Amino acid sequence: MQNKSLERDHQKASVSPAGVNPVDETVVRLEARIKKLGDICNELNPYAPVSDEFKKRLREFNIMEFEDPFKITNALLRLLEDSIDELHQLRPLSPEEMMKENLR
């Protein structure tokens, strides 16, 4: 009897009122964040001045230091690594994905 109650509580806790699993929502949010951070990393030119538009994008991630391109790079990489780690905790890599990662 108690196991069925615990099972129902777990099912309720793992699905939001809209019927969406919060873990799935977090995975989608993290994937979007990783893509956005990756795009910013690819566009960053440490030898060019940081444009106002680029500063706006950096502010979205709470990066407020714009004078030192190496501080910007380090902050971006730290955010990217933390986001990837969090994603892998929620959704471990499949064997196929692991093979792709090992080939890089």
Image (cartoon, rainbow, N blue to C red):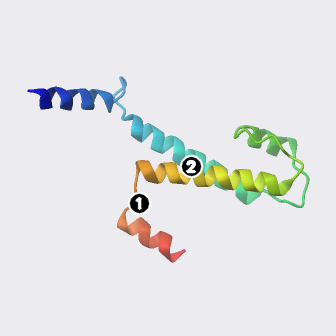
Location of residue 59 (image quadrant): top right
> Local crowd at mark 1 within 10 Å, few (<14), some, or many (≥20)?
few
Question: Reading the chain from its start, which is encountered first: label 2 or label 1?
Answer: 2
Where disc 1 sits, the SS reads loop
- Residue at 91% x, 52% y is 49
- Residue at 78% x, 56% y is 44
Query: Which quadrant is the C terminus positioned in?
Result: bottom right
Residue 81 is situated, as x and y percent measured from the top left of the image, at 60, 55
Q: Which residue is denoted by mark 1 in the rendering? A: 93
> Local crowd at mark 2 within 10 Å, few (<14), some, or many (≥20)?
some
Q: Which residue is denoted by mark 2 in the rendering? A: 83
As displayed, is residue 76 above or below residue 99? Answer: above
Q: Amino acid at mark 1?
A: Leu
Q: How many angstroms separate mark 2 from mark 1 (CA)?
A: 14 Å
Where disc 2 sits, the SS reads helix
- Residue at 80% x, 53% y is 71
Nearer the observer, 70 or 104:
70
Could you tell whether 17 is left or right of 11 in the image?
right
Residue 28 is situated, as x and y percent measured from the top left of the image, at 48, 43
